[in-house]
Image: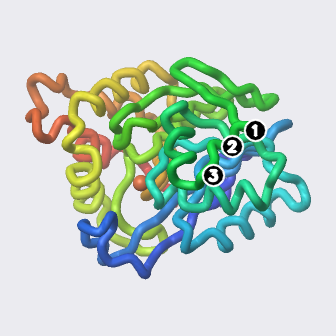
Amino acid sequence: MEITKDIVYLGVNDHAVDLFESQYSVPNGMAYNSYLIMDDQTVVMDTVDAHFTDEWITKIAAALGDRAPDYLVVQHMEPDHAGSIDAFAQAYPTTKIVSSAKAFVMMQQFFGTDYADRRIVVKEGDTLPLGHHTLHFVTAPMVHWPEVIMTYDDADKVLFSADAFGKFGALDVEEEWLPEARRYFIGIVGKYGVQVQAVLKKAATLPIETIAPLHGPVWRKNLTASWWPIPPSTAIPPTLPSSWPRNCAPRASRSL
Ligand SMILES: [Fe+2]
């Protein structure tokens, strides 16, 4: 499935999960999104839950054939996204792993290795040229863990937004978008209001045409105007710090 001419969807749908993160009911399952960027250099954006490693690696191989990805970008270390890192690293021993310093500390804790021989540590403002595309890294601490980064592709104007802009529900189920997006937001990042506002402020300066989150549908079309429509001090109570699901929903078209 194409997101853009150069970006392919690699994610999976989980219908076996009943309580996401052991606490949130997900009657329509959950999607763990991952993407492939095809350029002179190829990039896999995040992995998936370990229950879906084989399905996911099969998708990578179908897209790339015998070619190994040049980079794996790890934006978030929660197991639903990081669960297949080590299997990927073994399947593709030459691929470089790109992530934040904090994420590599977690990899050492999770997998017993921080991939020191093939890691690239990135921080705010760092870039990764791929050919036509260049990736720009944006730190997003506590949206919703401390190691999180987001990634902006300046060629296709795609923001890979990690857990932000996600929703509950698998992508092969038709359901009303807003209730599950709102419930996801409140449960997953709502308690980190200051940090969410900070990263949205940074993202609002980018000319974004597509938002590719780690859960839920990909967002397209004229999104920047929707992100920051109401001054937070007047519109957003502190315990529910961003109103983006409510305000973006009518203007965002969804493709997955
Ligand atoms: Fe997540």
* Label located before the other in sequence (3 or 2): 3
Residue drawn 18% across and 35% down? 241
Whether disc 3's CB lies below 8 Å from ligand 1 is answered no
- Local secondary structure at mark 1: helix
Residue to which mark 2 is pinned = 115
- Mark 1 touching mark 2, by CB under 8 A? yes
242 versus 32 height, above or below = above
Image location of residue 149, percent across then percent down: 49, 34
Q: In the figure, residue 9 lies in which quadrant?
A: bottom right
Residue drawn 51% across and 24% down? 207
Kind of residue sitting beneath label 1? Arg
Residue to which mark 3 is pinned = 35
Kind of residue sitting beneath label 2? Tyr
Nearer-the-camera pick, 116 or 89: 116
Residue to which mark 1 is pinned = 118
**Quick check: can you spot residue 139?**
yes
